[in-house]
Image (cartoon, coloured by chain):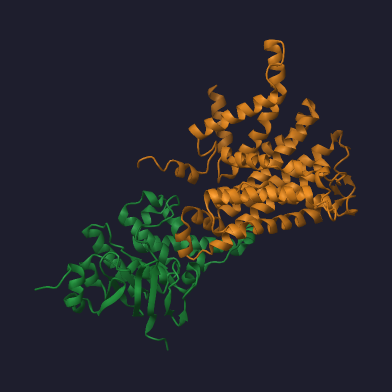
Amino acid sequence: MQAAALLEIRNIEKRFGGLTALAGVSLVINRKEIYGLIGPNGAGKTTLFNVLTGLYVPDRGQFEFDGASLVGLKPYRVAEYGIARTFQNIRLFGNMTAIENVMVGRHVRTHAGAISAILRTRRAREEEAAIRRRSRELLGYVGISEHAGALSRNLSYGDQRRLEIARALATEPKLLALDEPAAGMNATETVELRRLLEKIRADGVTILLIEHDVKLVMGLCDRVAVLDYGRKIAEGEPAMVQKDAEVIRAYLGGSLP
Amino acid sequence: MKTWIELSERVRAHRAAPWLGIALIVVTLFMLPFALASVGTAWVRITNLAILFALLSLGLNIVVGFAGLLDLGYIAFYAVGAYCYALLASPHFGLHLPFWVILPIGAAVACIFGVLLGAPTLKLRGDYLAIVTLGFGEIVRIFLNNLSQPINITNGPQGITLIDPFRIGRVDFSRTDGILGLAFSGPVKYYYLLLIVLVLAIVINLRLQHSRIGRAWVAIREDEVAAQAMGINTRNVKLLAFAMGAGFGGVAGGIFAATQGFISPESFVFVESIMVLSMVVLGGMGNVWGVVLGAILLSFVPEILRYTVEPAQKAMFGRLLIEPEVIRMLLFGLALVLMMLYRPAGLWPSKRRAREFAETDPG
């Protein structure tokens, strides 16, 4: 019997010099949930992402992912455990083609080393073929098959975002953490993105989402947490959170008459 | 004329055409040392040295071209390989192990040195990495220079002499054998051996490039943070690049020691590191064929100049105005400046590197 919670974050604190980016954030993400993380700029959302994916070591606090504590692990270990992410300012391998980018994502689930590559053993060849096959599938899954051979930096903005998702999915994550995937997308692209995320969830991947597009968050997320100055000020179903007085204050400043 | 074109097209379209091409290349490479020897035995030696440099360039290409780690002390691994061979196959310690035992040892020891250099420099990038690797190269050379006391290991600046040549069965690589009326001199035998090693090195380079590991190297070069987030253990993959590159240097060093019969720390100075790096950059970082081309050009052109500059000056002015050595360095510098201006990605760059250098272009 699996626990309902996939990720449990307890009292995470992160300071940069005098600035407290996260002041004791706790939250629980359940399996197969789409969990939204919103808040004004500088609220600490991306910092929390970086802590979860091993880029930052938190000053205090714990988090457990699928029953294992991942605090202090290197990013590549976190990826092994099954957290994959995208970046707010897209970080693709620009001079690699779209399919090569996804193939890099398969690295963590494949094994061929230098020796078997040099000897080109049967196993290495089969693995390489499987990597290519799976990567092609994933490009189709996110809907950019036709750009497989294009350099990732020449793709349109929306396609780059999709490619980043495909690359993250290639690592076979249990949790997919997306940092503002709809940023810079037009309305049609956002609708398509929403469909894609619903499909990913339907296929059994839990999604953690930072997003500013309120419509997308409200329509897509099962639950939402609001961060402000490194604190969680509200959590719950999107419609509830939307009415929360403190949330409104955080976004609009001051109190409403 | 027309029939000639038709004929060549028909040949090219034939199923056996690739094999014919390979056969032609093999025959040419086989006959090359005899053609060179007819000009002068020195040219066979120069060719061997060019192949050695091609080996070194292929090794450095893994570190610089694939993984994007600037290494200015690469010649240290060449030195390690050479001294391994010299110490295990010379009267210095009285050891005379066969070469097929020593070359793997030399490669392994060089790999260890590669990891020793790589481990402390993992967090360094660009300029800082270059400075540390430069220092590493010098440290190795200075050690070789001074390890004659208190126990005489390297024999200091005098170097090690009377190093054994390669022997396969009764075939001694320092003597001339006559087979089928052809005289196979020592350098000619080394040439064939080097050619085989070079082909192996090229195959290894190509296979690594198009493998899971090769992709990981490129990913690290492109964006280390993203590569880590995608599950690449950047530490191990970088160390692997250092170790593999160093291994090539170790093997090349061993063969170098055997062909020369004598080595001293003077052969492994900083300029040699720069030379190998120039070959990689000039030929085309990241492209195996470009790197080999760079090594061959930079090995041969100076030698050709050495033999032509003096007679040319004598013919024109009746006396020697500028020393050949000076002209060589002048032309070398000029060539590098022109390259950086007009073909910054190298003579024969990898597609990916060419794109990187074109990055500033709009679109």
Q: Which chain wears green?
A: A
* Residue A250 in sight in this render: yes
Q: Position of residue B270 (x, y in %)?
A: 67, 42
Name the quadrant of the N terminus of chain A. bottom left
Left or right: B273 as drawn, with respect to A20: right
Quadrant location of the C terminus of chain A? bottom left
Q: Quadrant of residue A14?
A: bottom left
Q: Residue furthest front?
A: A18
Residue A241 drawn above or below residue B345: below
For the point 41% across and 72% down, the residue is: A52
Q: Is A93 on the left or on the right of B176, as rendered?
A: left
Chain B color in figure: orange
Q: Residue at x 67, y 29 (%)?
A: B302
Q: Can I make out residue B68 in this image?
A: no
Q: What residue sits 56% from the left and 44% below the top?
A: B287
State the residue in front, B263 or B352. Answer: B263
Pick the residue in front: B330 or A173: B330
Residue B123, position as x, y percentages in the image = 54, 58
Residue B116 is left or right of residue A55, and the answer is right
Asked which quadrant contains residue A35, the reply is: bottom left
Expressed as whole percent of the image width and height from the top left, the position of residue A44 reads 33, 69
